[in-house]
Image: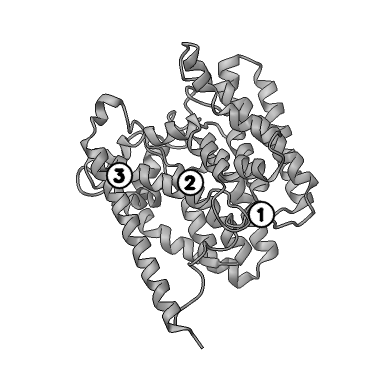
């Protein structure tokens, strides 16, 4: 028998939480609208997405290559004035970072992890530029939750989110496809495919042709903007910056790719922070183009959770402090923008750490490093009122 007073209290708590959340979003949006955004140079990455909606409906600009369903998901934010929309994006990014941050055993937020994450230069720059890390971080969390709890809808929605940046997710998607076919019965992974198709189809039908023309301006010719040589932290980008032989890049690509796939097939991990860190860092290294904004995704879904599970003084601490190097550069009077190979090396270090972590894990392990990463829902959101 359901305790009705308890259910009523839960409804009131949820209503109050929703009200506070909405008020906070309004404060962010209103406050940002009052700021001289242009003078501060904020929202540099967000502006093309915002500009895509100036005619009242989405139009693909030349610099956007995200899939159509990603563009449609941004519609509720992009329709507002530029300052307010940037403020809303910043608010939702903070909300996702906090919702997916490591927690202690009692379910409370890990203060050290939250402080290390939110004060990282790369996270602050992510917020300032208005990039789309919230979709990737939220999507990877949802994948962990859906896989562990066997929720078809969560896995399908996670695919919709993480395909926003294929350079981060292509190896995860490949491994997910293998795991779905091997581990889930036919009808369940077909349900995942059906739900994803249903959600993605409206965007494809509406904007798919414009998206494809942007990717391939001429027949079988990929746009030069997709794999541009500047601001590139992949191995291909490192070759351009450091001038090493292309044969060395090919060898590194083969070694990382074979080692990653071999380790995944041998250890059969789930979608834990170590496995996600392994796949996402390898995806970024092996892609033709990767941007340093993707460092935030790896930091949030893998490095900080693994660090907080390990000893305080560990490789994780080094990788976290690495993202603070721009502060040191500015303190020394040097440019805050570090050369791209610095972040290529960071990705390689993360990949190596995750290789060791996955190798040491129990074969077939589905474990997660904190209660909320793909685990239980936050306290107060479980249970039903009848």
Q: Position of residue 265 (x, y in %)?
A: 75, 50
In this view of the protein, which residue sits in the foreground, 243 or 301? 301
Q: Earlier in the sequence, mark 2 or mark 3?
A: 3
Element on which disc 3 rests = helix
Q: Which residue is mark 2?
A: 97
Locate residue 349: give its quadrant: top right
Q: Earlier in the sequence, mark 1 or mark 2?
A: 2
Residue visible at 57% across and 47% down in the picture: 110
In the rendered structure, the answer to whether residue 118 lies left or right of residue 260 reads left
Q: Position of residue 135 (x, y in %)?
A: 45, 48
Element on which disc 2 rests = helix
Q: Report how far apart the C-alphas of labels 1 and 3 lie in the structure.
A: 33 Å
Residue contact between numbered discs 1 and 3, judged by CB atoms under 8 Å: no
Q: Position of residue 369 (x, y in %)?
A: 66, 51
Q: Which residue is mark 1?
A: 368
Q: Quadrant of the C terminus?
A: bottom left
Pointer 3 local density, CA inside 10 Å: few below 14, some 14–19, many at least 20: many
Color scheme of the displayed model: one colour
Element on which disc 1 rests = loop
Disc number for residue 28: 3
């Amino acid at each position: 028998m359901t305790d009705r007073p308890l259910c009523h209290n839960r409804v009131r708590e949820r209503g109050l939480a929703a009200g506070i959340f909405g008020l906070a979003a309004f404060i962010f949006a209103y406050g940002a609208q009052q700021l001289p955004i242009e003078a501060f140079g904020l929202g540099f990455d967000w502006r093309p997405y915002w500009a895509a909606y100036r005619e009242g409906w989405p139009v693909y600009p030349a610099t956007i290559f995200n899939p159509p369903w990603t563009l449609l998901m941004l519609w509720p934010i992009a329709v507002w004035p530029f300052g307010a929309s940037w403020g809303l994006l910043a608010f939702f990014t903070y909300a996702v970072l906090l919702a997916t941050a490591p927690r202690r055993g009692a379910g409370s937020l890990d203060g050290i992890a939250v402080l290390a994450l939110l004060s990282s230069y790369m996270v602050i720059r992510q917020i300032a530029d208005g990039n789309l890390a919230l979709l990737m971080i939220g999507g990877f969390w949802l994948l962990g939750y859906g896989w562990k709890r066997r929720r078809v809808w969560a896995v399908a929605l996670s695919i919709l989110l993480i395909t926003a940046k294929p350079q981060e997710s292509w190896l995860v998607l490949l491994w997910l496809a293998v795991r779905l076919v091997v581990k889930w019965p036919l009808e369940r992974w077909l349900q995942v495919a059906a739900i994803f198709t249903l959600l993605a189809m409206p965007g494809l039908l509406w904007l798919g042709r414009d998206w494809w023309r942007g990717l391939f301006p001429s027949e079988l010719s990929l746009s030069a903007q997709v794999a541009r040589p500047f601001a590139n932290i992949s191995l291909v980008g490192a070759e351009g910056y450091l001038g090493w032989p292309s044969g060395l890049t090919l060898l590194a690509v083969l070694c990382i790719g074979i080692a990653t796939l071999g380790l995944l097939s041998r250890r059969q991990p789930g979608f834990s922070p170590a496995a996600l860190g392994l796949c996402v860092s390898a995806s970024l290294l092996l892609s033709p183009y990767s941007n340093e904004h993707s460092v935030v995704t790896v930091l949030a879904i893998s490095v900080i959770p693994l660090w907080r599970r390990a000893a305080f003084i560990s490789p994780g601490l080094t990788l976290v402090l690495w993202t603070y190097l721009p502060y040191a550069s500015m303190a020394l009077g040097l440019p805050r923008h570090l050369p791209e190979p610095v972040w290529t090396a960071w990705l390689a270090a993360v990949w190596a750490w995750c290789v060791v972590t996955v190798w040491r894990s129990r074969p077939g392990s589905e474990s997660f490093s904190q209660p909320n990463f793909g685990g239980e829902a936050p306290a107060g959101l479980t249970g039903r009122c009848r």
